[in-house]
Image: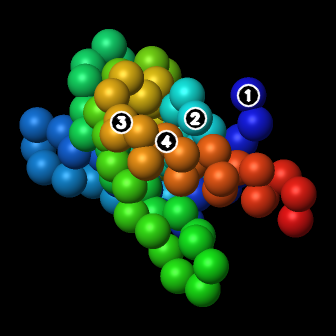
Amino acid sequence: ASVAPCEQRGLQGPDGPRRGRGGEGSRGGVSFFLVGPSQERTLRRVELGLRAGAGIRGIGGNGAVVRCERISKALDHYEVAVFLTDMADPDRATIDSFVEEALTA
């Protein structure tokens, strides 16, 4: 699957919203970095901000955390991957366009 860097990303968990950093996105899912873990095999709300023209278009959906790996012994930083399970068709179309544009740029 093709992937492209996300501009903004966030994960809604039982402890409230958490902003992620870095990462990539595709039609099937997203990965990014979080401070603190997010439990694998749990459903979470995902919010993304994708470049669209001169601005950022916010999209959202639900997904399952399929990976949460600590990336540093010294810091509480984790790489998190979320498989998108539920997203409105217009938002999926936005991801498709975003990835296509990123790959042809």
Residue 70 vs residue 102, the one in the foreground? 102
Dot 1 amino acid type: Ala
Residue 26 picture location, percent across and down:
62, 38
Give the mark nearer the N terminus: 1 vs 4. 1
The residue pinned by badge 4 equals 92
The residue pinned by badge 2 equals 27
Inter-mark Cα distance, 3 to 1: 17 Å
Q: Secondary structure at mark 3?
A: strand
Name the mark nearer the viewer: 2 or 4: 4
Q: Quadrant of the C terminus?
A: bottom right
Q: Are marks 1 and 2 in contact (CB under 8 Å)?
A: yes
Name the mark nearer the viewer: 1 or 4: 4
The residue pinned by badge 3 equals 87
Name the mark nearer the viewer: 3 or 1: 3
In the rendered structure, the answer to whether residue 23 lies left or right of residue 15 reads right
Give the mark nearer the N terminus: 2 vs 4. 2
The residue pinned by badge 1 equals 1
Q: Are marks 3 and 4 in contact (CB under 8 Å)?
A: yes
Give the mark nearer the N terminus: 3 vs 4. 3
